[in-house]
Amino acid sequence: MRRVAIAILLVGLCAQPLTTFAAGPNASAARALNGEIANINLVGVSFVDAIDYLRDLSGANINVNWRLLQDKNVTKDTQVHVRLRSVSMRKALQLILDEAGGSTPLTYFIDQGVIEITTQEAADSKLVTRVYDVGDLIVDIPDFAGPSMNLQQNSNTNNSTNGGGNSGGGSGLFSSSNNNNTTDKTATATERGNDLVSIITTTIRPDVWQVNGGTATIRFFRNRLIVTAPRSVQEMIGGRVE
């Protein structure tokens, strides 16, 4: 029996990227995003001042593509209203971006130690390639036939015993099934890998995949998934690209 449905639930927890993204210049920016902010009171504050506040508070390098945001009617003077306590900078930043963007989805990503703020559309146009080892997730786990339960036969056996008859030769409540009814439908590793690809492309941002008219690609090869997709998609599959 195929266990791909279970495997997809484990991808984000178990699949280990073959390349480490949290090292080098991106490490400090990642730490800043994960840092906790005790209190944020940004009510009626301009977008640019809110970003400056986070920059000063965290010490992180933050760059905003103001020209692109201006084209989407998101300006430095756009008002934000965010009040939070005991929250990570990552969450605070995303809420500020949601407030400022309105109907224009905004997002961020880390590039060479800089937290880049832009539109979701622009971020999705930049594809990142990651390779995931999913060999452990596509191992076929066979279904072994257990003992069969026969309540009718057990009842007849008890009646025969109570009547003084010979109950020899009868079987118990749980009897082994000598006839092997299991059908060998074991899928190959490639088939299970392709099933995993199909599940991902239909459940995780379906619109971005090339098979659905988008630009992102995913391929199964020798127990590995080779994924070229936006950072947001990579995060959903195997963790943050930082």
Image (cartoon, grey):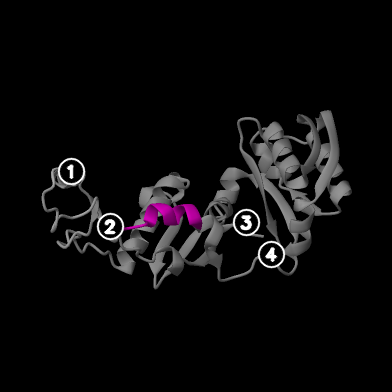
Q: Which residue is mark 1?
A: 162
Q: Earlier in the sequence, mark 4 or mark 2?
A: 4
Q: CA distance from mark 4 to mark 3?
A: 9 Å
- Name the residue at 37% across, 48% down: 212
> Residue 101 is drawn in which quadrant?
top right
Q: Nearer the viewer, mark 1 or mark 3?
A: 1
In the image, residue 7 lies in the stretch drawn in magenta: yes
Placement of 5 over or under 155, stated as above or below: below
Bin the neighbour count of mark 1 within 10 Å (Cα to Cα): few under 14, some 14-19, many 20 and up: few
Write down the residue under mark 3. 240
Asked if disc 4 and disc 3 are in contact, CB closer than 8 Å, the reply is yes
Q: From the image, state whether disc 1 or disc 4 is nearer to you.
A: 1
- Residue 163 on image: x %, y %: 13, 43
- The quadrant in which residue 239 appears is bottom right
Q: CA distance from mark 1 to mark 4?
A: 73 Å
Amino acid type of the residue tagged 2 in the rendering: Gly
Q: Are marks 3 and 2 in contact (CB under 8 Å)?
A: no
Please tell me which residue lies in front, 242 or 75. Answer: 242
Q: Counting other residues with Cα less than 10 Å from the Cα at mark 2, is it few (<14), some (14-19), or many (20 or more)?
A: few
Does residue 181 appear left or right of residue 207 in this picture?
left
* Residue on which disc 4 sits: 22
Residue extending farthest to the top is 44
Report the span colored magenta.
1-10
Other-residue count near label 4 (Cα within 10 Å), few / some / many at <14 / 14–19 / ≥20: some
